[in-house]
Amino acid sequence: MSQALPGDTPPVHDLIGIGFGPSNAAMAIAVSEHNARLGGEEPVTAHFFEQQPCFGWHRGMLIDDATMQVSFLKDLVTLRNPASEFSFLCYLKDKGRLVDFINHKNLFPLRVEFHEYFEWAAAKVDDMVSYGHEVIGVEPVFHGGDVTYMDVTVRSGEGLSVHRARNLVVATGLRPLMPDGVERGDRVWHTSDLLAKIDGLEDASPSRFVVVGAGQSAAENVAYLHRRFPRAEVCAVFSRYGYSPADDSGFANRIFDPDAVDDYFAAPEHVKNRLMDYHGNTNYSVVDIDLIDDLYRQTYREKVLGSERLRFLNVSRLASVKETQDKVHATVRSLVTGEETDLEADVVVFATGYSPADPLGLLGEAAEHCLRDDQGRVRVERDYRVATDPGLRCGIYVQGGTEHTHGITSSLLSNTAVRVGEILDSLLNRGSGSASYEARQVAGGIGSSAR
């Protein structure tokens, strides 16, 4: 791709994507398919920047037997274009496993397999992405007081480069969330650290793990550590009596439907809050019932045999954690009696979830043109475009961080294929294709000089 150094006049892209996880990979595929349909006439020019050296999606949680919680049909393309060559079924055909998968009679692939599918699909559009390129800033380009373009500054091993865009799509993903006052370390992990750090314990013969949390990741970590280290005790700490099952029934799953986004977006704030309360048990702090049953059977079996390695410290919370050179000292406090239990562990794993990155964090001065609601949250239109004042003529689209406007699927895979189609349609309907956009700029007397 062409690029320019700071101070030069860079070429203009219709779309620049910040981040290249599943959401922006789906965006690149949508653009690629759109351009293929046009046969080379007025293509949408797009490029994506990803700071990781290669495609990666929650690599630390690709436990060998962990499965997806969404159907394979909710891949990067199928709900938008069932005939796409980028589908999970096409991936299976390419890998020679299509018949085997059909015989498996399962809607939910292994998570490691779905990650391989993502890599396979991303490789098909790798001409549109630069890995090992970190976006470090965005500067507005002014003309006559209006922002007409965005200059995106990117850092790589080759130094800095600047790329100009008519539109941005920000998909910088989620950040591991730790409790206040707790820092990750050599023996204090977030679940996202698990597979990256676990091999270092193989020769240490660990005797105890503590896993904090009550959701799917917590239960998967408990099961995995218990299986991998057959001589170690695994202590699960959570404030409930036990893991709560995820509601994946047909009616409840309608909260993930594309039409549900329309309903949620149009609903008044108090209805939005009620919908999240009603259906939070489809996704938040819940566990697949099969995994719950497996863990319960295991703990009961150990009680019968008199060799309990799987311990559940329920109706409790972790009161303190202190890391030393070779151990972690954890104090667990009962929420009922206040009684404290001291545990000396080799590792404490926090399954405390993720938080969305600030979608405007990189926008600098351009963020001043973005509007917020009365609670200080970014205002986002139905087409995932950030609401801005009239002085900003560019489109800033966000994938993630829109739960307050678009509902529960904001950071989930369920609606990804449909969402990127809606963003692309919005971009095209606003006249942001190269030729049509330039014609509008000339007709309106708008230049492109940088301030």
Image: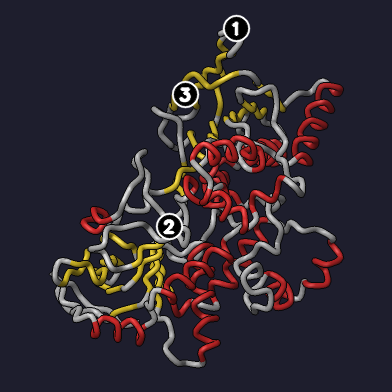
SS at mark 3?
Answer: strand
User: Residue at label 3?
Assistant: 321
Residue occupying image coordinates x 56% and y 26%:
345
User: Residue at label 1?
Assistant: 337
In 3D space, how far apart are the residues under numbered discs 3 and 2 (Cα atoms)? 43 Å
Image position, residue 412 (x, y; %): 57, 53
Query: Is residue 152 shown left or right of residue 352?
Result: left
Residue 265, compared with residue 303, is above or below; it is below
- Tell me the quadrant of the picture where the N terminus can be found: bottom left
Q: Count the labels in the image.
A: 3
In 3D space, how far apart are the residues under numbered discs 3 and 1 (Cα atoms)? 20 Å
Circles 3, 1 touching at the beta carbon (< 8 Å): no
SS at mark 2?
Answer: loop
Circles 2, 1 touching at the beta carbon (< 8 Å): no
Viewer-nearest of discs 3 and 1:
1
User: Residue at label 2?
Assistant: 381
Dot 2, crowdedness within 10 Å: few (<14), some or many (≥20)? Answer: some
Q: Is residue 53 visible?
A: yes
